[in-house]
Image: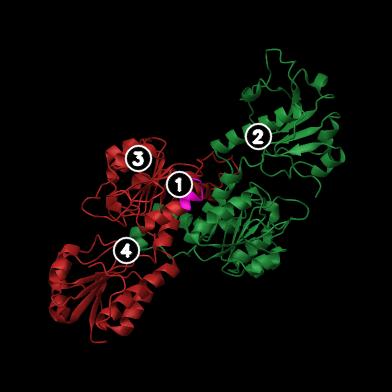
């Protein structure tokens, strides 16, 4: 269980507020020589609250205006996840507060998982594994054929650190890579489309890797699904809000979409029940980036950012708040 | 060519069956109830056998078909064809290499991801309504892990190429070292297994490679190691593998093939660190059609006195 109250006197170390949901288990044993963690339940909280310069946001605990109001001296918010849509970035910008994310710590695992989901959907791994475990192979014979990955046109939405790694992994499989992103990346050899609709028209698969903002909410809508076509596949490892989930389910139910690999949903942990009986859908409980190795990486990024902040050096993984 | 008798051994592909039926006098072995009677009636006209990974052309079948001239296998693996006997009797043999290389290599990488990241297990977790009760556990990262490949042929090389994109250091075991290969060579499977974390079987099944994955190799792979088998079931001492998995002596396994297909050891059904696939290595519409075309192409070439496309014997 969480054990935050330090019995030794660490008052010479700078303070960081720990912002977490009550049921989130947290241990700061890795940071006892870098900062003093303080949270609302701590007896020293009233002393440090007005002067604390740093807030560490654990997991996806929302950080809103009312929370920022409690910390008038905060200058930096340390995020610990890949996505930062749970942090009110506009408010941070208004208050001149800098924000960091987990940077690239999760990117490899995220990219690996996206590829894993895509292969699973195309080659029907989860469905076939179910088939074997149900004892159906000797009874019903060979499992129906899947679809080849090679030669498929893959469209990546968001060519950031995760999207770039997805592209790199899919190249040797013989996929053609194209993308849509806020900015064209001319140093990369992939075809750029300025909008997702054009990307969808020219793709067999869309892999959603971008961050969730006001601009990208429901970026996958019925027009995009129609353009993708009834053999099209959607893989989403971004955020549930990037996809119009009701439309997605409708398209799948009506056979107007080839399949989907989903790690995120609009209202987690709720997953539309219509999907539970489909063999062309793979459902994952928001695990794309969760490996012990990734957590090790996040810890390193957090420590790096904290050290940089407290010594007035450039932050490692600062989020650009100016979009 | 309709007079030429062709015996198809297994109902593996409707497309292949249709194509054979159009061109030849097709016999379907799976519909034969009285074998002796069947061979008495038809053996004289059967000049070709189309086999697959389930039923090929063993000595007994070859002896039943005195007019047999060519075996065209709907597979790349030829462990079910008595190659030595075919050579002795001057019977040509073809298989389907290259067209299925990519699908099988894709499957190997997919199996690694599905096994290490427990993707199928995650799907089960959601479908069983367990996510509402709590989060699924952490799983094992793939990128950067050491990959060891047994057999660096077409399929092994294609697997290596894919794994490299995940920043995996690649090593291999082969009958002999490949000159000029950028991957690290190990002269024995045990040494390969000791060094790597993910061991992949990608070699042909022969007398020498039967049970190439035995207790010693499994012990060398160890409790953090994963086994991926996309070769043939008999490559692995299945009983040893099952006990190692049940006892946690290796970390997990991704298996597309089994010693006694379609039977899969039921002890595996309850494990969350295995992925069990019903021999789908080349199982895509695109590849199976290409394989069928290659079988037909080889037969047509043979009966038109043209060079075989993909001869083995």
Per the image, the residue denoted by label 4 is B76
Q: Residues within 10 Å of mark 1 (few under 14, many from 20)?
A: many
The alpha-carbon separation of the residues under discs 3 and 4 comes to: 26 Å
Residue at left 34%, top 47%?
Answer: B266
Q: Same chain for marks 2 and 1?
A: no
Residue nearest the observer in this picture, A174 or A39? A174
Rendering colour (chain B)? red
**Mark 4 falls on what kind of element?**
loop
The alpha-carbon separation of the residues under discs 1 and 4 comes to: 25 Å
Vertical placement of residue A295 versus B208, above or below: above
- Give residue A301's mark: 2
Q: Mostly what secondary structure, the magenta segment?
A: loop
Magenta stretch bounds = B162-169
Q: Earlier in the sequence, mark 1 or mark 4?
A: 4
Task: Based on the picture, tell me whether residue A101 belongs to the magenta stretch.
Answer: no
Q: Residue furthest bottom?
A: B2
Residue nearest the observer in this picture, B256 or A129? B256
Rendering colour (chain A)? green
């Amino acid at each position: 269980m969480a054990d935050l109250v330090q019995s030794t006197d660490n008052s010479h170390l700078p303070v960081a507020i720990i912002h977490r949901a009550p049921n989130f288990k947290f241990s700061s044993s890795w940071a006892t020589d870098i900062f003093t963690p303080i949270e609302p339940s701590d007896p020293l909280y009233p002393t440090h609250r007005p002067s604390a310069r740093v807030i560490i946001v654990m997991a996806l605990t929302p950080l809103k205006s009312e929370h920022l109001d409690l910390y008038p001296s905060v200058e930096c918010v340390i995020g610990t996840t890949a996505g930062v849509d749970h942090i009110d970035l506009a408010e941070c910008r208004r208050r001149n507060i800098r924000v960091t994310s987990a940077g690239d710590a999760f990117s490899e695992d995220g990219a690996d998982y996206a590829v894993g989901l895509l292969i699973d959907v195309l080659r029907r791994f989860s469905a076939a594994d179910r088939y074997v475990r149900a004892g159906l192979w000797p009874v019903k014979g060979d499992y129906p054929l899947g679809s080849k990955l090679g030669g498929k046109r893959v469209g990546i939405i968001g060519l950031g650190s995760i999207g770039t790694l997805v592209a790199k992994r899919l190249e040797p499989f013989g996929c053609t890579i194209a993308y849509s992103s806020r900015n064209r990346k001319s140093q990369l050899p992939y075809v750029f489309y300025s909008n997702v609709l054009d990307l969808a028209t020219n793709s067999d698969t869309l892999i959603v890797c971008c961050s969730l903002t006001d601009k990208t909410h429901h970026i996958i809508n019925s027009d995009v699904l129609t353009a993708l076509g009834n053999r099209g596949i959607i893989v989403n490892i971004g955020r549930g809000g990037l996809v119009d989930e009701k439309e997605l389910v409708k398209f799948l139910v009506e056979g107007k979409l080839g399949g989907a690999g989903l790690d995120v949903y609009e209202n987690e942990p709720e997953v539309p029940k219509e999907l539970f009986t489909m063999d062309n859908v793979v459902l994952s409980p928001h695990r794309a980036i969760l490996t012990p190795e990734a957590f090790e990486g996040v810890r390193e990024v957090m420590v790096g950012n904290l050290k940089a902040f407290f010594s007035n050096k450039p932050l490692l993984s600062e989020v650009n708040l100016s979009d | 060519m309709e007079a030429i008798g062709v015996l198809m051994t297994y109902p593996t592909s409707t497309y292949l069956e249709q194509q054979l039926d159009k061109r030849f006098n097709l016999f379907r072995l799976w519909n034969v109830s009285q074998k002796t009677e069947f061979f008495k009636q038809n053996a004289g006209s059967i000049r070709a056998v189309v086999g697959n990974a389930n039923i090929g052309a063993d000595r007994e079948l070859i002896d039943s078909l005195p007019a047999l001239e060519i075996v065209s296998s709907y597979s790349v693996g030829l462990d079910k064809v008595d190659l030595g006997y075919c050579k002795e009797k001057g019977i040509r043999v073809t298989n389907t290499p290259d067209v299925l290389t990519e699908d099988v290599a894709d499957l190997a990488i997919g199996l690694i991801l599905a096994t290490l990241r427990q993707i199928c297990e995650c799907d089960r977790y959601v479908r069983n309504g367990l996510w509402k009760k709590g989060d699924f556990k952490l799983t094992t990262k793939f990128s950067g892990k050491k990959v060891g490949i047994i057999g660096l042929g077409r399929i092994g090389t294609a697997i290596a190429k894919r794994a490299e994109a995940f920043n995996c250091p690649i090593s291999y075991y082969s009958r002999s070292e490949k000159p000029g290969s950028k991957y690290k060579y190990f002269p024995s499977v045990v040494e390969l297994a000791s060094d790597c974390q993910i061991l992949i079987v990608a070699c042909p099944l022969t007398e020498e490679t039967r049970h190439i994955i035995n207790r010693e190799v499994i012990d060398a792979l160890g409790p953090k190691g994963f086994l991926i088998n996309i070769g043939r079931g008999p490559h692995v001492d299945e009983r040893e593998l099952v006990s190692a998995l049940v006892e946690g002596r290796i970390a997990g396994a991704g298996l597309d093939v089994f010693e006694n297909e379609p039977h899969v050891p039921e002890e595996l059904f309850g494990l969350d660190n295995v992925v069990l696939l019903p021999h789908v290595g080349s199982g895509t519409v695109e590849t199976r059609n290409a394989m069928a075309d290659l079988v037909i192409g080889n037969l047509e070439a043979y009966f038109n006195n043209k060079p075989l496309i993909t001869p083995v014997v």
